[in-house]
Image (cartoon, grey):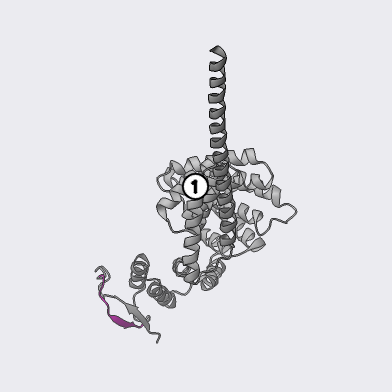
Amino acid sequence: ALKWLIKNLKSNQNSKLKSGSTWFILVDPILMDLNDLLYRAEIFSERFEYELAINCYKAALTLSPENCQVIDDLTDVLIDAGHTEEAKIFLRKSIEISPLENPGKYLALAQHSQGHEAIALSKRGIELLVQQKNEGKYSSQEELQHLNQQISSAYTSVAEIYLTDSCFDDDAEDNCEKLLQEAVKYDPNNPEAHQVYASFKISQSNPEEALKLLKKSNDIWRNAEEKPLYTFRLTTTKLYVELEDYESALEVLLDLLHDIDTNPEVWYLLGLCQNAINKPSLAQESLTKALELLALEERGGKKDEANLRGSAEVLLEQVIKAKEQIIESDDEVEDNAEMDSDDDQVSTTHLDQIRR
């Protein structure tokens, strides 16, 4: 019989797991109750003890091999634990067993696939979600809103593929715009849809429309209860920089620094924006900070794959030269002012002599 090594287990399903306690129990899944295994798997997942949760879910599958709910829950934990390839195997198994159940598994598999395979999986997931909506399976307003949000996010994800992996397809531009229109239609308050739409308009060399969409996205998440992911907001700043709206970029960058102040890329972008709005002293401080953080990362073994150091060094050199030119210009102004003052004094003395 299979034996599973599980930490912090109690025989009573309704009792709480003690935090900090450690003991090991060898469990034979044949003798275990399915509900008890799933309960414990859920507890371990909530406590971020993913490996123990995975063991419980796999033990549950020995009792119910074609239980798609168990398979789907297992794939969620595998993804959280970083076991992407194994998760993809179970996602495909779930699709094979029950292709019409849980559209989310198509979207999850698409997220970890590429190109046309990802597009096909996403479209199938969207079809099933729209079908659920048309069949009226969700009656409450809250459920319908959540479903619309899912559909909008799925359309946005496919559009992003046409902007990246499949950008050279003959119909990429048309497909991308149609998908983004659908995304905004299903959820007009989806900040990600508007931001990807802005990126699409940039690719079309339409900066005016892109800026409108980006500001729309920004307004939506600024007024939301929760901020979007850090990486999403970092992309926001890069798009603002690309559109040369440095003031808006600075606003988001300061927000990012409030969350995490050790990201060298944020400090570099901050310096870039400060330099663009003629604040060289602040730009010099930000760029210097970026280089210091990059040095720390490099000592820790992290590679600077984007050559951020090179960009920061070049920009810092330009900022320092610009500051020196400003100082020289100010000195010249002061010298000229002094000469003008002397001339005024000479002219006044000469006039006084004439009057006398």
Q: Is residue 195 visible?
A: no
Residue ID at (44%, 59%): 262
What secondary structure predominates along the stretch shown in magenta? loop
**Which segment is the magenta one?**
19-28
Given residues 77 and 218, the one toward you in this image is 218
Q: Which residue is at the front of the view, 241 or 89?
A: 241
The answer to whether residue 200 is above or below residue 337 is: below
Give SS at disc 1.
helix
**Side of 323 relative to 207 (left or right):** left
Question: Outermost residue toward the bottom?
Answer: 1
Left or right, 300 with respect to 13, comes to right
- Please say whether residue 145 is one of the residues in the magenta stretch: no
Residue type at mark 1: give it: Ser
**In the image, residue 211 lies at what x, y percent?**
59, 40
Counting labels gives 1
Where residue 53 appears, x then y in whole percent? 39, 72
Above or below, 260 against 199 in this view is below
At a point 64% along the width and 41% down the height, the residue shown is 207
**Closer to the camera in the image, 189 or 265:** 265
x and y percentages locating residue 22 in the rendered image = 27, 77
Q: Position of residue 112 (x, y in %)?
A: 56, 65
Kindly identify which residue carries mark 1: 281
Instruction: Single out the residue that lies furthest toward the right.
Output: 170
Look at the image and tell me in which quarter the N terminus lies: bottom left
- Estimate how packed mark 1 is, as few (under 14), some (14 to 19) or many (20 or more) residues with alpha carbons within 10 Å: some
Regarding residue 54, the answer to whether it shows in the image is yes
Residue at image coords 48%, 52%: 286
- In the image, residue 192 sits, relative to residue 27, either above or below, namely above
- Confirm whether the magenta stretch covers residue 24: yes
